[in-house]
Image (cartoon, rainbow, N blue to C red):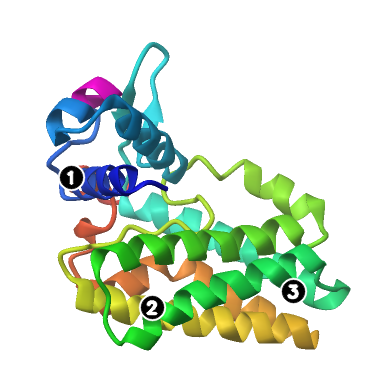
Amino acid sequence: MSEAESRVQSDLRKMILEGEIGAGEKISEVSVAQLLGVSRTPAKLALARLEMTGLIEKRAGRGYVVCEVNIKDVEKILIVRGALEGSAAGYMANFGVPDEARWAFTESLRMTSEIIAKGHAVMRDVETYQEANTLFHTTIMERCGNEYVMKSYERLRHLPLAELGAVAPNTDRLEGEFLRMSIGHAQHAVVHDAILRGDAMRAEMVMREHSNATLDYARLFVGRNVDAHIPSLKLGAAG
């Protein structure tokens, strides 16, 4: 990801999550380019990446619209995603780790361990962590050896925050983000170790906890005002 694309994606994510761009509002690569003072290419690429997280949705015509969700919807989605990711981790522990998965795990853990070793985080570290996090989660789901787990997940993947490895960081509170990344890295290491040792029960248990606790970790480490992490909550208490 280029520096310009990374900045545009981070700025847009923050504006959406903090309500500067409201639920139902239409945005396009042209409007984003004008808003953030960039060319249309990084704006276009950033919008495509945000669509993968479920924060925005492609319109039938041109451009995107900011999605409306509520906290209960997100919690239900994360529970189901956690069950699927836990099953994938347990299955891989039982039936073996392909070589490409071993490489991906090593690379993901290398990226996150370098961040944690510094003892603090800057904005670029948040983006790097998200790339490593996505690599770890997609590797488990796509390389676990059970294609039916992935087929089940496909029905969820475009729902808000259902994308594998998706988090909604608050870059105004980098100290809290560093704590959350530290916990995430530690859990990745535990899951990885359990998979390599063939401990399916532990791999599934820790992976499920890690996957479906996105909101809990946001509250614990980055602030209890979860509105800063989930789009459009101001519109929707439980329905």
Real-space Cα separation, disc 3 to disc 2, in angstroms: 27 Å
Q: Nearer the viewer, mark 1 or mark 2?
A: 2
Drawn side of residue 136 relative to residue 221, left or right: right
Q: Earlier in the sequence, mark 3 or mark 2?
A: 3
Query: Which residue corresponds to the image point at 21% horizontal and 47% vertical from the top-left?
Result: 11
Judged from this view, the residue extending furthest toward the top is 61
Evaluate whether residue 2 shows in this view.
Answer: yes
**Residue 35 image offset from top left, x and y in percent:** 13, 31
Real-space Cα separation, disc 3 to disc 1, in angstroms: 38 Å
Query: Which residue corresponds to the image point at 64% horizontal and 72% vertical from the top-left?
Result: 105
SS label for mark 1: helix
**Residue 228 image offset from top left, x and y in percent:** 20, 58
Residue 58 is one of the magenta-drawn residues: no
Residue tagged 2 = 115
Magenta stretch in the rendered image = 26-31
Q: Are marks 1 and 2 in contact (CB under 8 Å)?
A: no
Query: Which residue corresponds to the image point at 23% horizontal and 62% vertical from the top-left?
Result: 170
Q: Nearer the viewer, mark 3 or mark 2?
A: 2
Type of residue at label 1? Met
* Quadrant placement of the C terminus: top left
Drawn side of residue 65 relative to residue 182, left or right: left
Q: Earlier in the sequence, mark 3 or mark 1?
A: 1
Evaluate whether residue 28 shows in this view.
Answer: no
- Location of residue 227 with respect to 25 vertically, above or below: below
Q: Are marks 3 and 2 in contact (CB under 8 Å)?
A: no
- Location of residue 108 with respect to 70 vertically, above or below: below
- Location of residue 197 with respect to 110 vertically, above or below: below
Q: Earlier in the sequence, mark 1 or mark 2?
A: 1
Residue tagged 3 = 90
Bin the neighbour count of mark 3 within 10 Å (Cα to Cα): few under 14, some 14-19, many 20 and up. Answer: many
Type of residue at label 2? Ile
Residue tagged 1 = 15
